[in-house]
């Protein structure tokens, strides 16, 4: 490590305005102890030694990431001989990861995590399914690649909810995996050992969390799913579901039910579940998924990039469903970008505006608060400026021209609306994770070191 060491505030942080669980407040002073908010007071003066901040928000949870895919960003935007879809992109992804070493995976993950913190994500759910070497053989240390994910999170300082993935098959009904999936597959016994190793590793991280991730109904049989669920024992359970229309059709052909319908029928799906994507839902599935209190893990930028489809956010909100946001393939890492895409896809589909706003909250605030709450639930952690929660705090720069209208309007919701819908990059000014300030003036303290290592890694991979 080099550069400036991370620092915790010597006294406290004073926020001119902050979004608290009950709404916007002015002159908010927070103190931090053992990585958590020790006190939160509104309408109080700053104390000597306090760091002074204009606008403060709780850090956003990122419910779904495949960190290694950041290295592919911008490299798949061309069309080959065949009709280009998610499934053709997936084959390119398989070929790309075939050359990655453990060092490569750590370097790429660290770069992705730096960009996440700089964007305002303070915790990531890493849906970690790379387990084997490039030939598909287990490493001597079964947790070799898991250790690299944990090391990257530790170096960068981002909160981590580790979601080791069980992946055994190449299609519904227990189909054999393809050659491209050889780095993912494991047996139930291998997974149980990996899960226990992950438990030990995550305990070494401040505020680390653990969950399980049966990859999908394509990759896990019902019998395997029933064997995996007891491992969670109250921990988060994440599973891909209904991302693609072909997936829905294949699931119906296999079981007579749609993927989310099958999970709701046989899960049983409850508040511990996060169904990643859930893009293609029937009206009945929307109502039942919302009633289950599970979280829909939306990744709208990736879903747009891959041509997946549009999540029925308006109907799901009307049913009081919970959702969080994730960066998935990490094609572009942006809190504002993910939230904006949710609303814009609804507008494009329905040819109307402000479809997710409510009578008392703007569109930006509805999106932000829903993703904050749903993301925290999905990752088994708190995400709020409140006593006892991890001190994950994001400040925004209102001095930027793109935020000038919000600053002049003097309203809290306009700040979120301007950030999400009107501003470009550079709005996130400072970020604290577990009370430690990792981002100042928009840049992570180790950005240069980690970026240099990342560039060297890509140069080598792209020559392979």
Image (tube, rainbow, N blue to C red):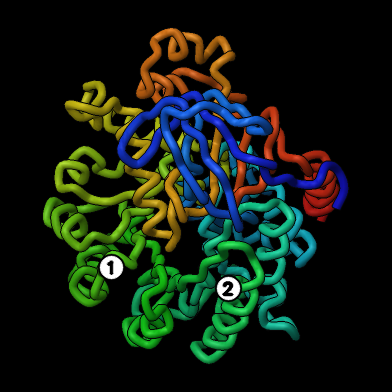
Q: Name the residue: 71% across, 34% down.
A: 443
Query: Mark 2: few, some, or many residues within 10 Å (few <14, many ≥20)?
Result: many
Q: Is residue 153 left or right of residue 31?
A: right
Residue 462 is marked as none
Q: Secondary structure at mark 2?
A: loop
Looking at the picture, does residue 231 appear above or below residue 145? below
Q: Position of residue 167 (x, y in %)?
A: 49, 75
Q: Position of residue 453 (x, y in %)?
A: 83, 49
Question: Would residue 346 appear left or right of 427 to someone viewing this image?
Answer: left
Q: Earlier in the sequence, mark 1 or mark 2?
A: 2
Residue 92 visible? The answer is no
Q: Is residue 251 visible?
A: yes
Observer-nearest of 223 and 367:
367
Q: Secondary structure at mark 1?
A: helix
Compared across the picture, whether 93 is left or right of 258 comes to: right
Q: Residues within 10 Å of mark 1 (few under 14, many from 20)?
A: many
Q: Write the residue at 82% across / 39% down.
A: 448
Which residue is depicted at the point 39% across and 59% down? 378
- Above or below, 285 against 77 in this view is below
User: Looking at the rendering, in which quadrant would you find the C terminus?
Assistant: bottom right
Residue at image position (86%, 43%) is 3
Image location (x, y in percent) of residue 419: 47, 24
Q: Which residue is mark 2?
A: 184
Q: Quadrant of residue 232?
A: bottom left
Say which residue label 1 marks.
Answer: 251
Q: CA distance from mark 1 to mark 2?
A: 21 Å
Q: Nearer the viewer, residue 382 or 154?
A: 382
Image height of 411 relative to 300, above or below:
above
Farthest residue, direction bottom: 189
x and y, in percent, of residue 458 in the image:
78, 48
Q: How many marks?
A: 2
């Amino acid at each position: 490590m080099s550069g400036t060491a991370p620092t915790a505030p010597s006294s406290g942080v004073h926020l001119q305005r902050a979004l608290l669980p009950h709404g916007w407040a002015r002159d908010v002073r927070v103190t931090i102890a053992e990585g958590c908010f020790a006190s939160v007071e509104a309408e109080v003066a700053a104390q000597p030694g306090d760091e002074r901040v204009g606008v403060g928000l709780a850090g956003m949870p990122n419910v779904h990431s495949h960190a290694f895919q950041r290295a592919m960003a911008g490299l798949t935007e061309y069309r080959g001989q065949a009709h280009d879809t998610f499934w053709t992109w997936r084959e390119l992804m398989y070929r790309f990861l075939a050359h990655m070493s453990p060092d490569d995976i750590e370097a790429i993950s660290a770069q992705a995590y730096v960009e996440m913190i700089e964007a305002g994500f303070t915790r990531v759910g890493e849906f970690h399914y790379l387990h084997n070497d490039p030939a598909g053989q287990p490493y001597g240390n079964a947790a070799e690649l898991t250790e690299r994910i944990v090391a990257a999170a530790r170096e960068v300082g981002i909160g981590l909810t580790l979601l080791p993935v069980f992946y055994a098959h190449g299609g519904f009904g227990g189909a054999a995996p393809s050659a491209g999936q050889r780095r993912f597959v494991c047996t139930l016994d291998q997974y149980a050992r990996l899960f226990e190793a992950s438990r030990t590793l995550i305990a070494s991280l401040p505020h680390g969390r653990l969950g399980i991730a049966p990859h999908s109904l394509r990759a896990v049989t019902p019998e395997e799913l029933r064997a995996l669920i007891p491992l969670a024992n109250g921990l988060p359970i994440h599973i891909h579901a209904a991302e693609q229309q072909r997936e829905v059709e294949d699931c119906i052909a296999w079981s007579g039910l749609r993927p989310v319908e099958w999970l709701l029928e046989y899960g049983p799906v409850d508040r511990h579940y996060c169904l990643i994507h859930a893009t293609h839902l029937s009206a009945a599935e929307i109502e039942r998924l919302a009633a289950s209190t599970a979280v829909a893990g939306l990744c709208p930028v990736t879903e747009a990039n891959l041509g997946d489809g549009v999540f029925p956010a308006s109907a799901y909100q009307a049913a009081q469903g919970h959702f969080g946001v994730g960066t998935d393939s990490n094609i572009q890492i942006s809190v504002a970008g993910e939230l904006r895409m949710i609303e814009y896809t609804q507008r494009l589909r329905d040819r109307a505006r402000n479809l997710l706003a409510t009578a008392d909250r703007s569109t930006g605030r509805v999106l932000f608060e829903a993703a904050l709450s749903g993301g925290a639930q999905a990752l088994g952690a708190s995400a709020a400026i409140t006593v006892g929660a991890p001190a994950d705090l994001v400040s925004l720069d209102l001095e930027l021209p793109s935020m000038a209208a919000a600053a002049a309007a003097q309203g809290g919701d306009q700040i979120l609306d301007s950030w999400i819908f009107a501003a470009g990059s550079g709005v996130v000014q400072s970020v604290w994770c577990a009370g430690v300030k990792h981002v100042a003036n928009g840049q992570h303290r180790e950005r240069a070191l980690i970026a240099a290592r990342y560039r060297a890694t890509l140069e080598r991979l792209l020559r392979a």
